[in-house]
Image (cartoon, rainbow, N blue to C red):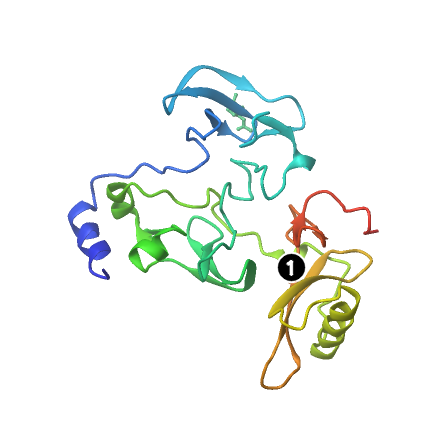
Amino acid sequence: MQGIIPILAIVLCGLGVVISLSCKECLTTDVYCINQTSYRNCINNVPIGNVINCRADTVCSNSNDVCVESSKINEDIQDVCGTSGGIGCGQCTSNKFTCVSQNQFVRCSGTTLIDSNIYNCDTDEVCISEAISKYENICVPSCARDFLNLKATCSNVDYTTTTTAAPTTTTPSPDEKASACSAAETSLQIPATTKYFLTKYPLDTCGSYLYCEKNEKTAKWDTVYVPCPATKPFFDSAKSLCVATKPSSCT
Ligand SMILES: *[C@@H]1O[C@H](CO)[C@@H](O)[C@H](O)[C@H]1NC(C)=O
């Protein structure tokens, strides 16, 4: 398995590459987002007809409404050509790693992005989340990608680190994180069998969340503090993910 990509790379490099992303691609909604604010319709996966501009303050999305207000963008309705990188970008599913830009990836813990460490693919490689299960490698040489008909998972060039997302909060100490996890375990009535859970932090502004995992050896909490990204600055406890629209329980 390991040998497939390098061999294809040698055979195919130099044939030229066409970047294929969910941006500039016919989506299942039969919409081809040209850029963040305009689109064309598709028939049989081919864009047809005139360029249509989205109304002011709306962006081309994967919803049936096509152009939606930026504030409505969430985990399901995505800003296809926006800086968030499009569908599947920066999302942890069943894999251990996920792409966060065209060329970078991070570790996943369950469905949580552990983005304190960001890894780079080589300069001539493209990050493709699905390649890790198929080819045991998340970084695919650009030329092999076309042959294999794979798409870069993210359309954004750089990953916007989340450190600017929650300017009013400071990173909590290990003790603060552990006691916040204990308090949340009680208030959220987390069952004893639950291996890990997420809880908003701090409780009032919801700008970040904690990943709490009970360490079976020490019986203490292993914790990761994760600020929500600038595009989705609030942690929604009901959905257990960062969202763009402030939940009513947050100030
Ligand atoms: C998007 O594409 C349209 C059509 O090519 C163009 O008129 C518009 O200026 C572009 N918008 C941006 C933000 O690049």
Q: Which of the 4 quarters of the picture holds residue 56?
A: top right
Horizontal side, residue 87 vs residue 142: left or right: right
Residue drawn where x is 81% and y is 46% of the image: 248
Image coords of residue 237 (percent x, y): 72, 54
Q: Is residue 212 above or below residue 156?
A: below
The foreground one among 148 and 24 is 148
Image coords of residue 12 (percent x, y): 19, 45
Tell me the crowding category of disc 1: few under 14, some 14 to 19, or many 20 or more residues within 10 angstroms, Cα based.
some
Q: Which of the 4 quarters of the picture holds residue 219?
A: bottom right
Q: Residue furthest left?
A: 11
Horizontal side, residue 8 vs residue 78: left or right: left
The residue carrying mark 1 has its beta carbon less than 8 Å from ligand 1: no
Helix, strand or loop at mark 1: helix
Q: Which of the 4 quarters of the picture holds residue 198?
A: bottom right
The residue singled out by tag 1 in the image is 163
Q: Is residue 27 above or below residue 157?
A: above
- Say what amino acid the circle numbered 1 marks: Thr
Instruction: Locate the N terminus and report the quarter of the image it occupies.
Output: bottom left
Image coords of residue 222 (percent x, y): 62, 76
Q: Residue furthest top?
A: 49
Question: How many labels, in total?
Answer: 1
Residue drawn where x is 74% and y is 74% of the image: 182
Residue drawn where x is 41% and y is 38% of the image: 21
